[in-house]
């Protein structure tokens, strides 16, 4: 049972991390900066670059590294207290997006 509890966190985290990095690499390889796919649809994928972080947080690398470390530490400490596989999986998804920046 313990193994499934650990997998419920780490598999989504690693899956999101891999999907995130692969999709970014695909966009960098296949779309010019500012190009959208499809070009005129209401919902489209557009190649942009953000010098900061999520929600426009400052691009100061020391600040971002400390913030990432704090979020990672919080999630890793908090998830061990949870018994719900769904909540662990949800935290894994959050960690996959946030914690590996």
Image: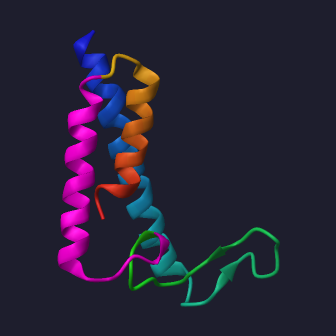
What residue sits 37% from the left and 39% below the top?
A: 92
Residue that protrudes farthest toward the bottom in the picture: 33
Q: Where is residue 40 in the image (x, y as percent from the top left)?
A: 82, 80
In the image shown, does 18 or 12 lie closer to the viewer?
12
Q: How many marks?
A: 0
6, above or below 21, in the image: above
Quadrant where the image shows the C terminus: bottom left
In the image shown, does 71 or 32 lie closer to the viewer?
71
User: What segment is highlighted magenta in the picture?
Assistant: 55-81
What residue sits 63% from the left and 87% below the top?
A: 35
Q: Where is residue 50 in the image (x, y as percent from the top left)?
A: 45, 83
In the image shown, does 35 or 81 lie closer to the viewer?
81
Query: Is 46 colored magenta in this rendering?
Result: no
Magenta stretch secondary structure, dominant: helix
Q: Can residue 18 be seen in this view?
A: no
Q: Where is residue 41 in the image (x, y as percent from the top left)?
A: 82, 74
14, above or below 24, in the image: above
Q: Position of residue 59 (x, y in %)?
A: 32, 83
Q: Is residue 37 visible?
A: yes
């Amino acid at each position: 049972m313990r193994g499934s509890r650990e997998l419920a966190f780490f598999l989504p985290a690693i899956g999101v991390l891999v999907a995130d990095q692969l999709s970014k690499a695909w966009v960098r390889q296949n779309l010019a900066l500012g190009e959208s796919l499809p070009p005129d649809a209401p919902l489209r994928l557009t190649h942009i670059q953000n010098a900061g972080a999520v929600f426009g947080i400052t691009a100061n690398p020391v600040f971002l590294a400390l913030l990432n470390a704090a979020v990672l530490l919080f999630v890793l400490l908090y998830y061990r207290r949870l018994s719900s596989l769904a909540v662990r999986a949800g935290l894994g998804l959050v960690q996959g997006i946030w914690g590996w920046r």
